[in-house]
Image (cartoon, rainbow, N blue to C red):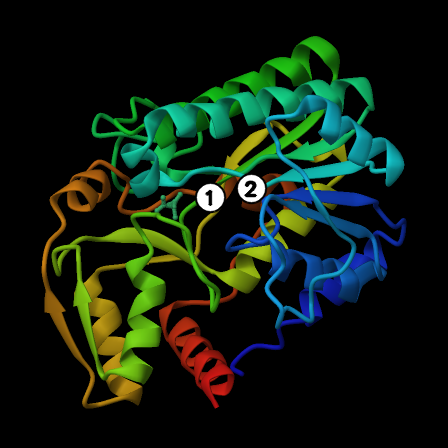
Amino acid sequence: LPIDPLARFRSIADATPTKPRVLITGSLGQLGRGLNTVYKYMYGDVVTMTDIVKVPTDAADVSSYQYLDVLSQGAMEEAVVNNRIDTLIHFSALLSAVGEQNVPLAIQVNCRGVENVLEVAKKHRLRVFIPSTIGAFGPSTPRDSTPDCTVQEPTTIYGVSKIYAERLGEYYHSKFGVDFRCLRFPGIISATKPGGGTTDYAIKIFYDALQYGKHVCYLRPDTKLPMMYDTDCMSSVVQFLTAPPNLLHRRTYNVTGFSFTPEEIATSIQKILPNFKIEYNICPIRQAIADSWPRSLDDSGAARDWGWKAEYGLEETVQVMLALIERDMA
Ligand code: AKB
């Protein structure tokens, strides 16, 4: 692998030896299992993983798992009390493309879920992390080097619900002192299944490249979007959650890796797999969403305040994704 994926987590754990007790909602989605593995590496068994589906039988990495529907505040409180939780990481959400297909469910999960999380955090004095997204911006936002503080007029229910999470979290922080922390993620590239987003092509392209030698992309070849590799995403979460509160000048920060178009990522894959081909069959819904989002994010606020820095660029990401998926397929 081009980068030692564990070095950063070792130094964060050394600098902050106090073990947290963490509950992750939606932990069987794209990011939860990876974050559980990171925490296990840093502090041992400190995570209670929760979700509403059965753990896949081959998921050897899933430990301390329990059913939790984020729409039940009582059940969430019970899980927090029984497991002596001090840090709640709220990953449950319907993403951008799937949210447009079921707006009432997106409102339930994304808005009611956040309300429950913040109430439980207030009552039990929890540190709480809720991810936001480039989807919280819209067509009237400056699309290049989008700053932390700018116009936010999203056109998807996902974006609307994420602004609600940002603002409600900031409100609970200033009104009730809840230690709310929020990062706006770009598309996350991981060797795990994504769940109904607009940036999902940037994962599927690797599986297709190795399995079929060809990917049919639902976005135009020149659609530039900001992205970040999985390990950088994990380290942004643990680094931000261990940052002393006095360093934080805001509670919601942009973080990002690098930006590319489908054409550019295909060219990078072709450097390793010369016969790989990309074709296009545009999905108007996902294209319209992508066209309303930033092309790149300015994350200098996170860099300045708590030392955030992404390590993976496009070339490293392509190398590591192909290596991991090839290993899993073997
Ligand atoms: C999506 O595409 O909906 C997500 C995101 C950028 O928030 N991956």
- On the image, the x and y values in percent for residue 314 come to 36, 69
**Are discs 2 and 1 less than 8 Å apart at CB?**
yes
What's the residue type where badge 2 is placed?
Answer: Ala
Looking at the image, residue 136 sits to the left or right of residue 285; the answer is: right
* CA gap, disc 2 and disc 1: 6 Å
The residue lying at 83 percent from left, 46 percent from top is 20
What's the residue type where badge 1 is placed?
Answer: Asp
- To which residue does mark 1 refer? 299
Secondary element at tag 2: helix
Please determine whether, in this image, residue 6 is positioned above or below residue 118.
Answer: below
The residue lying at 28 percent from left, 35 percent from top is 101
Please determine whether, in this image, residue 175 is positioned above or below residue 126.
Answer: above
Q: Quadrant of ligand 1?
A: top left
271, 52: nearer the viewer: 52
- To which residue does mark 2 refer? 302
Secondary element at tag 1: loop
For label 2, the crowd category at 10 Å Cα-Cα, with few meaning under 14, some 14 to 19 and many 20 or more, is: many
**Res 309 seen here:** no
